[in-house]
Image (cartoon, grey):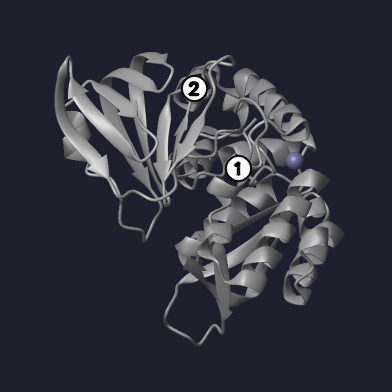
Amino acid sequence: MFDATTKKFLLEKKIFQEFLMLFAGIKPVLKTIITINMYEPLKQICDCNGLYIRKSDFKVVIDPMRDMFFRIPFSDNRSDRIMVYVSKSKDMAEEVCSSELNGNTESIGRLLGYPKCCVNHYMAMTKKFEETKNAIYQDRILQTYLNTKGDASFYLNNLHHKEMFYLVSHFPCSYNCKYSVALAKKTLNILESEDAVLANDILLRLKLPALYSNYSTLFFEGLCFRNNKILYSQVYESTREGIESVFDLDMFKTGNIVEIKEKAINIFNDEKLLNKVTGLKDFVLFNFKSEKEKNMVAG
Ligand SMILES: [Zn+2]
């Protein structure tokens, strides 16, 4: 679909899947934050592919703790990032742009192709935070988890988004939202026909057991997952940009078994208990791989 240079650019900017969704008509408009120097190369890609691109009349400062951004004028040097809206339809791109200025989240969600249930959940959590000022409502991953009845689907694993391993670009209302799963399956189909190796790599990553707390995630390249224990050979981490990790990765690297208790995490090397991690808030062990196992929350 794209030439090699374009594909490399889109992959590096982590918007490859979203571009595929846009082309396939699954996503009417793509909205993303880029640095100003990315605008011209991105515009060229859009021009060559019959896409309309609109840049925001403001710069943005990202607040990683709230999955939000703040608008600042172009003259403000605190940020070099802008928002762009890309679509096959000029009208739709412009509509997202004006909805952004009017704070119309419902309209933005619809035009970005997000399921209605997920947009409603997003808005409800934003409202709850505004009413209570309780930071727990700002943690979209935790809120999605808490709203999940039954098992989490790997199709909706959004913990790897920073590394561009994802099949949905929105926060689902739950980790088994059927509308989001349907969307993810469509994206996967397109991705498989476009780049089967990449699709397979993404699937492998999305199925890894993950330990999440406060915007930090540990992924276990595991041999097995039993109840609340993971036997693993390797562990790596992903932390939201601008956030300090709550995990001591090196500590986990010394072990090969992690056991999740109600208020603590035990790290073993075979039978030997190496460390007991306590004091972590709201941690969640995700088992995206197996449909049978239950996830658990503690903290
Ligand atoms: Zn939903």
Q: Residue at horizontal 57%, vertical 54%?
A: 42
Amino acid type, mark 2:
Lys
The quarter of the rendering in which ligand 1 is drawn is top right
Residue 267: horizontal and vertical position, in percent?
Answer: 22, 29
Tell me the residue that label 1 is attached to: 146
281 displayed left or right of 164: left
Residue lying at the far bottom of the rendered structure: 75
Q: Quick one: 203 or 152, which is closer to the camera?
A: 152
Above or below for 224 versus 54 = above
Mark sitting earlier along the chain (1/2): 1
Amino acid type, mark 1:
Leu
Question: Crowding near pointer 1: few (<14 within 10 Å), some, many (20+)?
Answer: some
Tell me the residue that label 2 is attached to: 207
Q: Secondary structure at mark 1?
A: helix
Residue 123: horizontal and vertical position, in percent?
Answer: 73, 60
Q: Residue at horizontal 55%, vertical 75%?
A: 59
Above or below for 240 versus 287 = below
Q: Is residue 51 visible?
A: no
